[in-house]
Image (spheres, rainbow, N blue to C red):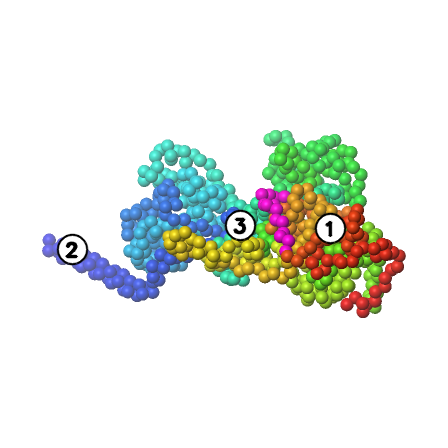
Amino acid sequence: MAHITNFTRIILWLLLSASTGALLILVSAYLYLSPKLPPVDVLKDVQLQTPLRIYSTDNQLIGEFGEKRRSPVTFNQIPTQFVQAILAAEDDRFFDHHGVDIKGLLRAASQLLVSGSIKTGGSTITMQVAKNYFLSFEKTFSRKFNEILLALQIERELPKQEILELYVNKIFLGNRAYGIEAAAQVYYGKSISELDLAQLAMIAGLPKAPSAYNPLVNPSRAIIRRNWILNRMLDLKYIDDNQHIEAISSPITATYHGSKVELYAPYIAEMVRKDMLKRYGRATYTDGFRVYTTINSELQASATKAVISGLLAYDQRHGYRGPEQNLAVNDDSKASAEQDNSETTGEPDYTGWLNQLRKASRPGDLVPAVVIDVQEQSASALLASGDAIEIAWENGLKGKRPYVTVDRLGPNPKTASDVVAIGDVIRVQRQADGQWLLTQLPAAQAALVSLDADNGAILSLVGGFNYSQSKFNRITQATRQPGSNFKPFVYTAALANGFTPASTINDAPIVFEDASLESTWRPTNDGGKFYGPTRLRYALFKSRNLVSIRLLRSLGISKAINYVEKFGFDTSQLPRDLSLALGSHSLTPMEIVSGYSVLANGGYSVQPYLIQQIDDINGEALYKAMPNTVCRSCDDPAVKPVAEATEELATLEDILQQADSDPEPALPEAERVIEARVAYIIDSMMRDVVKKGTGRKARKLGRNDLAGKTGTTNGPTDAWFSGYGGGIVTTAWFGFDKNGVLGNREYGGSAALPIWIDYMAVALKGRPEIAPKQPEGIVTVKIDPTTGLLAKPGQSNAIFEIFREELAPTKEADSDDISGDTSQIEEVMEEDIF
């Protein structure tokens, strides 16, 4: 008995010694490691890596940039069933322990002793938070001990709800998704609050192994993991039998969903991304910035539609260029397409063709398809989805004349086989009535930009047909010759320097001799005709080239260049010769629309801007735009000054209420750069371009406040229309990236103006017409339309014209003043050009 007692004492002593030793080791480890641990209070203000998000002015998502997709949620936004699912999967005693699960740790420790590695968890959710936010993922004792210590500290500092919130927002769940909200968007295209039980359990199964249990990559393993979690939830009485049966029988519904862009404006998104990189560097992609742009979603969608419609209309006018390729010429594809599936359906197997079709780009709604059958007046085709469609004779086959050259089409087709053949990869577009229309990818390009004329805010911008095909932004990067689109700036310079709308310039042939050139320059009008003495108003709305050249020569090139600088142009890039009058230099559409904004707002300088506000991840404003803004009512005596209005507040309460308010700071007033009377006169001249000149197609909009100017360059290679109305100024450009010829009859009024009209029809809807106020010092005089001089009393063909009062004509027209002699060609030597 004494022997047993002594043995027991020895055992107890050894156990006590081992326990004491273990305790000393743990205490020593704690004393050694504890000072090196990071402070857990930083979790209270933790900033998770969150992507840059870009929005329209009405809060529609335009783009998202960042390596990690994340949308943090609060605890109250987490569905109860997801909390139960994640606890069943990871830590069902989460709300009972203090950060450490002793049983789990002992299991992990025994694995480490036996095998030298830790194969299963033991980690609580709190310990995972410690690891995810502070530690590495190596499986070592020191890291695990640090994890334990941090978990205990976290539990002392934070409530359980905050710990769980930190966990669900940090965890990686595959496919660049960090956090449960991002995972819900990626796998189901919904918010986490919209998912059903089976979907919630699927996401709850991902933290253990995001790749192994990924429903997109490993659906079989994913569903096993999901069902295990559902069984655990049933065992833990989180769900009842009926819920369990329904969820466990549900199929996998996960499919990949990219960033849920609400407004298609990729050129805008890229412009903002570049701007943000300049401001914040790489933090742009991680710090959760929210950028609110000046883009109006309705106008942006309208601009995109107008550009695409204009390009497709041009393609329709110039013929069908044929299929993008023919898969039947590929032996492998042909064999794959023609083999019989006699064991199954007996139908041809088009797998090879469909695989190739799925590689084709899909810009907008121009869907790729492959022709599988051709009847006399119809064709059948397959979409990449495998769905079969029918193209009727009336839907693009009839009248689909082949392209021969830019100015010549082939004969009208008589049967569908004259247009398409089996194996052709074509483009189709679904119409509103469900029918499919044969079309093609445009070869040309077009672009549009629209501003608020009073402050320069960019309302819409389309940099090309399709961003996925070409990321080149033709609004900001393409420098093209504006042609006659530049004339209003030259005419404004002339009006400011003594010319009037009634000034007459001889529209006659002119030759420029330049010793440095191998040939002479003989500019002409469109059509090659000459019209003699022409009033400037008439010359502008008829776009007479020779009048513009002679006007610039009379004005003086240096004087003109100095003046057009007021429109914001870099004068160092402008040619110092008479070709300036015809827009021979290169400018971007953004420079053009910026210049036109001065004409549109009555003579004030405003700068185009895109970013309205930048918020940090917490919604605090880091930047707010303060654009120079035109005050249209500042000269109106009916508008009382602020000080005067304040004095009329009825009561002391009103005054205190106003004092307590936090009004937005007043925007800086735009600088006037064009004298008011000059701005008024050039505006009236540009309105005539729409009323009776090259822009008259715009009359279909039914407004009286529209003004603008067409532009077409030699070839023609570039077609423009810039104009304004209702406080909106817009430029549309049309052409080929490599300066290809557009073809006969493709002018600014036929290629670019229809795009402008389609866009402005939406942009101006509901906007009141803006009638410019006539400034003091403007007089209206009856003149002779031929000479621009005062009309004779009772002259039947007299017309009204406006003048600055000091420049109004005082001499009465006389028959001797009228000259129609244009037979002499004027020679101008090189020294006369400058």
Label 3–label 1 contact, CB within 8 A: no
Residue 420 is situated, as x and y percent measured from the top left of the image, at 73, 38
Would residue 765 appear left or right of 235 to someone viewing this image? right
Count of all numbered marks drawn on residues in the image = 3
Give the quarter of the image for residue 317. top right
> Which SS does the magenta portion mostly show?
loop
Between 667 and 80, the one lying in front of the other is 667
Return the residue at label 1.
800
Picture residue at 34% right of the left edge, 61% below the top: 39
State the SS at label 3.
loop
Picture residue at 66% right of the left edge, 64% below the top: 565
Q: Nearer the viewer, mark 1 or mark 2?
A: 1
Give the quarter of the image for residue 610. bottom right
Between 213 and 246, the one lying in front of the other is 246
**Amino acid, disc 1:** Phe
Q: Looking at the rendered structure, which numbered label has been put on residue 101?
A: none
State the SS at label 1.
strand
State the SS at label 2.
helix
Return the residue at label 3.
56
**Amino acid, disc 3:** Ser
**Amino acid, disc 2:** Thr
Tell me, yes or no, whether the highlighted magenta stretch contains residue 625.
no
The Cα–Cα distance between marks 3 and 1, rounded to whole angstroms, is 46 Å
Residue 93 is situated, as x and y percent measured from the top left of the image, at 30, 46
The Cα–Cα distance between marks 1 and 2, rounded to whole angstroms, is 125 Å
Residue 605 is situated, as x and y percent measured from the top left of the image, at 61, 60
Picture residue at 43% right of the left edge, 43% below the top: 192
Which residues make up the magenta segment?
Answer: 761-775
Return the residue at label 2.
8
- Mark sitting earlier along the chain (3/1): 3
